[in-house]
């Protein structure tokens, strides 16, 4: 089995309007410690109930593990708090060993910046220690460099000054200490002593940089900007997002060739989703600067019935599908890939969306987690693949309870919105009469002004 990491759970504290929320994702891994199938999870709930909070938390996780600056997440922390805390659980296969891993970290406001105040990784090797407790692999906090474990005593003694400098730089720059480049370099000097630590740290970092794709509303908003198109890419040689714009850019020629491969890959699937539609990457200008670099202007075009138009003139739904399709293809075919998408249904025809999710849930090898308002998808997923948001700020996420095999989940959900038969309330009811009167009152108020 190749190395892989699968997200199986998350706990969120102090993110936006989520005081606390816990999600356990359906996974096919624990039944036999093999990935025979992938996982698809949909998160549903009314507006403002915490769906996007999870996606934003996943974006924070990606940047945290990548060792990036986290200042952009300042406003993500609950306005009534100066700190948020995230916990993610993973099942991993690393060098033919299987682990359960728990990662916890806190982000704290300081003046107009943020810093990682606490971070901790615990683990347990599966198979040999299934009933044992998780052991601390590594931890760091405001008060301690590398926790209380004796594992790092000698390492700290030999590198105390360098470690303190590294820790201070991490605080100033607002990124993780454990996943910082400087800390990795220090550990690598003693690589023979810290093989298990480095194996897990490198696996988590690789997962974030190469295999974890998080599409937030902020990312999707860029799609609607004129002459700008973000293309999510996943190939054997490239992983990430590339913005196609009608401006001169200097790129490596190998990257340009990878973009062309991604377009060809997308075209194979696109015509089955949107009949007769294909993409074409047109070169407006191309100058060779050096042996490997080119100065280029690109435009992405859609072709239907022989007619070419700029991709920016297509509908929001089509642009969204095209933007994430490469990552979607990767998640379908690669057990290592995790794709998390906010408002997956936005602008997409509901019948098409339902059929697409049915195909994905039947044959996917990787993992897809999405938020949605479209209830048709509920008819295509099983009950364990659906997470529901609640109106309770202190318990934001739940799942269906007492569901029979013959139940239609869409009908059960709509019934629950009305009758509140689940343990947690799923919907803050509105009154049509109140809405009607409020609209009238607002209109009269405007006339008086």
Image (tube, grey):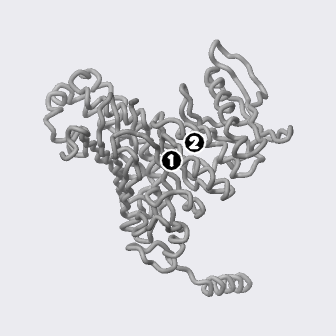
Position in image of residue 272 (x %, y %)? 70, 43
Quadrant in the picture for the N terminus: top left
Position in image of residue 286 (x %, y %)? 75, 22
Q: Which residue is mark 1?
A: 368
Could you tell whether 44 is left or right of 19 in the image?
right
Q: Which mark is residue 82?
A: none
Marks 2 and 1: CB-CB under 8 Å?
A: yes
> Which of 446 and 301 lies nearest the eye of the viewer?
301
**Residue 264 shows in the view:** yes
Residue at the right extreme of this rendering: 306
Quadrant in the picture for the C terminus: bottom right
On screen, residue 102 above or below 413:
above
> Which of 428 and 363 lies nearest the eye of the viewer?
363
Of the numbered discs 2 and 1, the one sitting upstream in the chain is 2
Position in image of residue 31 (x %, y %)? 34, 46
The local crowd at label 1, few if under 14, some if 14 to 19, many if 20 or more residues have their Cα within 10 Å, is many
Q: Which residue is mark 2?
A: 328
């Amino acid at each position: 089995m190749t190395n892989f990491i699968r997200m199986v759970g998350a706990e969120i504290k102090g993110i936006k309007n989520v005081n606390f929320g816990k999600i356990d994702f359906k996974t096919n891994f624990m039944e036999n410690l093999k990935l025979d199938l992938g996982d698809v999870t949909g998160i549903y709930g009314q507006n403002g109930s915490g769906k996007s909070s999870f996606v934003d938390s996943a974006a924070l996780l990606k940047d945290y593990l990548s060792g990036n600056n986290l200042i952009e997440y300042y406003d993500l922390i609950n306005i009534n708090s100066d700190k948020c805390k995230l916990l993610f659980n993973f099942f991993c296969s690393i060098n033919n060993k299987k682990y359960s891993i728990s990662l916890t970290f806190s982000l704290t406001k300081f003046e107009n910046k943020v810093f990682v105040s606490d971070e901790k990784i615990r683990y347990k090797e599966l198979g040999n220690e299934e009933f044992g407790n998780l052991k601390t692999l590594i931890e760091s906090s405001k008060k301690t460099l590398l926790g209380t474990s004796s594992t790092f005593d000698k390492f700290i003694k030999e590198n105390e000054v360098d470690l303190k400098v590294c820790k201070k730089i991490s605080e100033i720059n607002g990124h993780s200490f454990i996943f910082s480049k400087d800390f990795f370099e220090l550990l690598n000097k003693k690589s023979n002593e810290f093989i298990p630590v480095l194996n897990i740290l490198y696996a988590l970092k690789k997962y974030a940089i190469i295999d974890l794709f998080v599409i937030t509303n902020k990312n999707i908003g860029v799609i609607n900007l004129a002459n700008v198109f973000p293309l999510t890419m996943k190939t054997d040689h490239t992983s990430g997002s590339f913005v196609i714009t009608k401006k001169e850019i200097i790129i490596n020629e190998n990257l340009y060739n990878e973009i062309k491969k991604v377009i060809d890959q997308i075209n194979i699937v696109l015509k089955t989703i949107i009949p007769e539609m294909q993409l074409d990457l047109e070169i407006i200008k191309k100058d060779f600067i050096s042996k490997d670099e080119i100065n280029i202007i690109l435009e992405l075009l859609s072709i239907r019935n022989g007619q070419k138009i700029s991709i920016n003139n297509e509908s929001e739904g089509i642009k969204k599908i095209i933007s994430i399709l490469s990552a979607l293809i990767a998640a379908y075919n690669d057990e290592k890939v995790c794709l998390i998408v906010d408002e997956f249904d936005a602008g997409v025809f509901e019948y098409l969306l339902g059929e697409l999710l049915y195909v994905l849930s039947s044959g996917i090898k990787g993992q897809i987690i999405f938020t949605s308002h479209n209830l048709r998808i509920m008819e295509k997923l099983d009950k364990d693949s659906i997470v529901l948001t609640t109106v309770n700020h202190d318990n934001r996420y739940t799942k269906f309870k007492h569901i029979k095999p013959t139940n239609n989940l869409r009908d059960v959900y709509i019934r629950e919105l009305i009758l509140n038969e689940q343990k947690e309330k799923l919907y803050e009811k509105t009154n049509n009469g109140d809405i009607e009167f409020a609209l009238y009152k607002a209109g009269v108020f405007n006339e008086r002004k």
